[in-house]
Image (cartoon, rainbow, N blue to C red):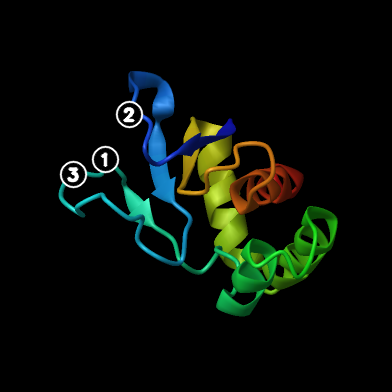
Amino acid sequence: MIQCKRVYDPAADDDGYRVLVDRLWPRGIRKTDLACDEWNKTLAPSTELRKAFHGETIDFAAFSESYRQELAAQQEEGKTLAARGKKGTVTLLYAAKNTEQNHALVLAQWLRSLA
């Protein structure tokens, strides 16, 4: 099972393996204070794509499509995380304020398609 959660939300027992999937460390959180098992920058959107989306140069649909193209180059890394999700819960941690349109949701959907 693969789920998404804001990095600012408290850790829960059912989170399983917690992976930070942002390229930048989240503001206001010390590295020693974040309960996460892995910081995976490889599966985060590129800096250019992230800036285009947050700068509203592109909409979420265009962002999602471009991000999936970037993820296509990371098949092996994705398969490793997807396999972990088959064995137990994987929680993708993200810092974005928008809980309905963010890269972690696109990543989770992509990982589920690999499983």
Question: At which x and y percent is residue 110?
Answer: 72, 50
Name the amino acid, label 3: Asp
Q: Within 10 Å of the Cα at label 3, are there few (<14), some (14-19), or many (20+) other Cα atoms?
A: few
Name the amino acid, label 2: Ala
Query: Residue at image x 65%, y 44%?
Result: 105
Q: Quadrant of residue 34?
A: top left
Instruction: Using the image, determine if residue 70 lies above or below residue 15.
Output: below
Contact between marks 2 and 1 (CB within 8 A): the answer is yes
The residue tagged 1 is 35
Name the amino acid, label 1: Ala
* Alpha carbon separation for disc pair 3 and 1: 6 Å
* Residue furthest to the left: 32
The residue tagged 2 is 11
Q: Which mark is residue 64?
A: none
Mark 2 or 1, nearer chain start: 2
Q: How many marks?
A: 3
Q: Which mark is residue 33?
A: 3
Residue 59 or 9: which is nearer the viewer?
Answer: 59
- Pick the quarter of the image with the C terminus: top right
Q: SS class of the residue under badge 1?
A: loop
Q: SS class of the residue under badge 2?
A: loop
